[in-house]
């Protein structure tokens, strides 16, 4: 029987809990409202001929590059940020190389870096999930080949000044600094300006979150033309499907939709955080479309109670430093109102149960 490479054989399996997601999905940081109506219109125009032909990425890449203020050779379209991480790891890592991540963070950095045979070292973001800039910099060694950072971070929502990431890229010139801006639209600040002068900086974006197109699997990675040409050599020519490519231009053109949705999320996030504070539940500042909150020993009961009310939230208790934590996605005004009602009911119910047991 053919054996996979040892780095692959020893990978931890990562199975996001996708089964049975019936109800209001506040568990995957998706857009809860649905994409711009202009994208749906474009989808309806797709013809059999469009589906029969192999997709052409380059013209759409040009549009995305212009949108990002970059040249087409500085941008590669990918099947979401996930593929951008995969390509960056495959292009730049070798067995024995070291990759630094800040924990807790998005799981795919560790999986895809480890698959190359590289060693992943996690620098804990403690206390309070703040970015451990000094420890991270002090952890860079001659073996360090990549640092992967989500800004804002998942599952914490913590964000750092992009200037700090640009400074990091300036200080660690031999290290690929992979900045994952999947939640950029909710934060509004970016490291993408650094791409023009820093040959070691990659910045990834996605249409999966604010744009509401997670199912289409499309994103982009920006970097120096040298680094992007390495990723382009590795990418398969039809990595982004034609349906997704057909939607990207109209999705980008409808920035009014993004502004309106992001405004709902930001307002809903503030209300949720105030409500958690009122209920005496610890939560952390977030610049993304979700909030991490600590339910202590009751985290499972909280997730179950919400599910019984038709709302899915994500237990993150087993993430490093996240004991008892649940991540709650924030969505449209209407969905946020449903969330708050259920949150109050479930917390009251859990406290009554605990009171009765004492
Ligand atoms: C930090 C971060 N990066 C990347 C992704 C995946 O994005 P995409 O759908 O573009 O692959 C997620 C999704 O949860 C995420 O939280």
Image (cartoon, grey):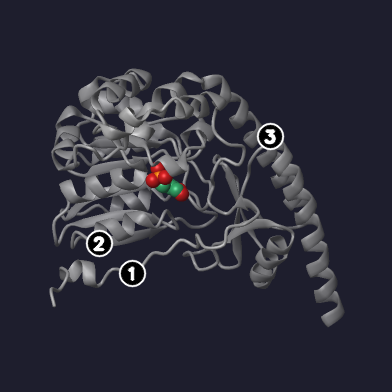
The residue that mark 2 highlights is 114
Instruction: Say whether disc 1 or disc 2 marks the residue closer to the N-terminus.
Output: 1
Q: Secondary structure at mark 3?
A: helix
Residue 345, position as x, y percentages in the image: 81, 59
The residue that mark 3 highlights is 267
In the rendered view, would you say 169 is above or below 119? above
Residue 165, position as x, y percentages in the image: 35, 37
Residue 53's image quarter?
Answer: top left
Residue 304, position as x, y percentages in the image: 68, 67
The residue at 37%/33% (across/down) is 243
Instruction: Say whether disc 2 or disc 3 marks the residue closer to the N-terminus.
Output: 2
The residue at 54%/62% (across/down) is 316
The residue that mark 1 highlights is 12
The mark closer to the camera, 1 or 2, is: 1
The residue at 48%/39% (across/down) is 183
Q: Is mark 2 within 8 Å of ligand 1?
A: no
Q: Secondary structure at mark 1?
A: loop
Q: Nearer the viewer, residue 327 or 102?
A: 327
């Amino acid at each position: 029987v053919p054996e996979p490479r040892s780095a692959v054989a020893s990978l931890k399996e990562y199975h996001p809990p996708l089964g049975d997601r019936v109800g209001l999905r506040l568990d995957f940081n998706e857009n809860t409202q649905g994409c711009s109506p202009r994208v749906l219109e474009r989808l309806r125009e797709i013809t059999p001929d469009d589906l029969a032909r192999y997709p052409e990425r380059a013209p759409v890449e040009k549009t995305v590059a212009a949108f990002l203020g970059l040249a087409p050779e500085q941008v590669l379209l990918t099947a979401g940020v996930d593929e951008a991480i995969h390509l960056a790891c495959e292009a730049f890592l070798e067995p024995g190389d070291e990759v630094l991540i800040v924990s807790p963070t998005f799981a795919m950095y560790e999986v895809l870096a480890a698959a190359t045979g590289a060693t992943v070292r996690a620098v804990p973001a403690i206390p309070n999930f703040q970015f451990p800039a000094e420890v991270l910099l002090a952890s860079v060694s001659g073996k360090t080949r990549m640092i992967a950072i989500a800004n804002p971070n998942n599952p914490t929502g913590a964000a750092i000044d992009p200037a700090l990431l640009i400074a990091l890229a300036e200080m660690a010139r031999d290290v690929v600094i992979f900045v994952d801006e999947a939640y950029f639209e909710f934060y509004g600040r970016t490291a993408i300006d650094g791409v023009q002068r820093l040959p070691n900086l990659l910045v990834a974006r996605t249409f999966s979150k604010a744009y509401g197109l997670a199912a289409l699997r499309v994103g982009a990675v920006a970097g120096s033309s040298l680094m992007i040409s390495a990723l382009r050599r590795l990418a398969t020519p039809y990595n982004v499907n034609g349906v997704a490519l057909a939607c990207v231009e109209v999705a980008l053109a409808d920035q009014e939709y993004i502004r309106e949705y992001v405004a709902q999320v930001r307002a809903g996030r503030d209300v949720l955080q105030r409500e958690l504070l009122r209920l005496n539940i610890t939560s952390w500042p977030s610049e993304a479309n979700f909030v991490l909150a600590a339910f202590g020993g009751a985290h499972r009961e909280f997730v179950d109670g919400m599910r019984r009310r038709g709302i899915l939230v994500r237990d993150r208790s087993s993430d490093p430093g996240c004991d008892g934590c649940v991540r709650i996605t924030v969505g449209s005004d209407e969905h946020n109102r449903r969330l708050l009602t259920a949150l109050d009911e479930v917390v009251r119910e859990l406290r009554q149960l605990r009171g009765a047991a004492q």
